[in-house]
Image (spheres, helix red, strand yellow):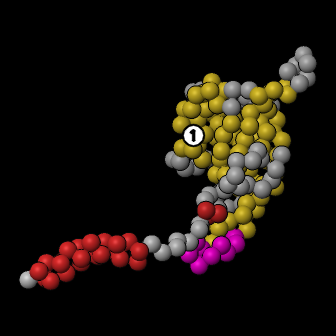
Amino acid sequence: MKKLVRLGILGAILCPIISMVISCSEEADCSMATRSMVNCILYRVDPETHYVENVTLDSLTVTAYGTDSIIINNQKNVHDISLPLRYTEESTKLIFRYSRTKSDTMEIHHTNTPYFLSMDCGYQMKQAITSITCTRIALDSIYIKDNEAGIYGKENIQLFY
């Protein structure tokens, strides 16, 4: 009987330990599989000194044209934004709303190149900006600093107001 009790106690102790050791397998590193974003910094040119300086918008809402997708919802004190690009099309059209009556439309033309990441992570899309067109209600101009959308937060587009 003592051996049966010892065996039960030993089993109760070893079962969780063995389970943890067996379950700790190496997982696939899909960190590269996060969605690429276009990072935009907002600027303005001082009319007196002609120096470029950062600007902050009081309020901004960004929506995808032709859908009900809201990318940024009435964000306050905006000085930089991250925007997704469409995987299925070669252009992404976005509406920037500054107030109820004031908005700009920006169309980003880009290339989508699929590449194989791994069996566990599947395919990912490399996206490169080719050109940008926009209305000029509040926006003054746009400069493409780096055309490769990425996951590391580097500046892609400079928006001048």
Q: Tell me if I can see residue 136 in this picture.
A: no
52 sits left or right of 65 in the view: right
Q: Residues within 10 Å of mark 1 (few under 14, many from 20)?
A: some
Q: Residue furthest right?
A: 49
Q: Is residue 128 above or below residue 20?
A: above
Q: Is residue 4 above or below residue 56?
A: below
Q: How many marks?
A: 1
Q: Tell me the residue at 53%/48% (across/down).
A: 69
Q: Position of residue 137 (x, y in %)?
A: 73, 30
Q: Is residue 22 above or below residue 136?
A: below
88 sits left or right of 149 in the view: left
Which of the 4 image quadrants contains residue 62? Answer: top right
Q: Tell me the residue at 68%/32% (across/down).
A: 79
Residue type at tag 1: Ile
Q: Residue furthest left?
A: 1
Is residue 14 magenta-colored? no
The residue closer to the viewer here, 97 or 82, is 82
Q: Tell me the residue at 65%/37% (across/down).
A: 96
Stretch of the chain drawn in magenta: 114-122
From the image, which quarter does the N terminus lie in? bottom left
Q: Tell me the residue at 85%/21% (across/down).
A: 46
| Residue underneath mark 1 | 72
The residue closer to the viewer here, 111 or 121, is 121
Q: Residue furthest top?
A: 48
Q: Position of residue 49 (x, y in %)?
A: 91, 18
Is residue 116 magenta-colored? yes
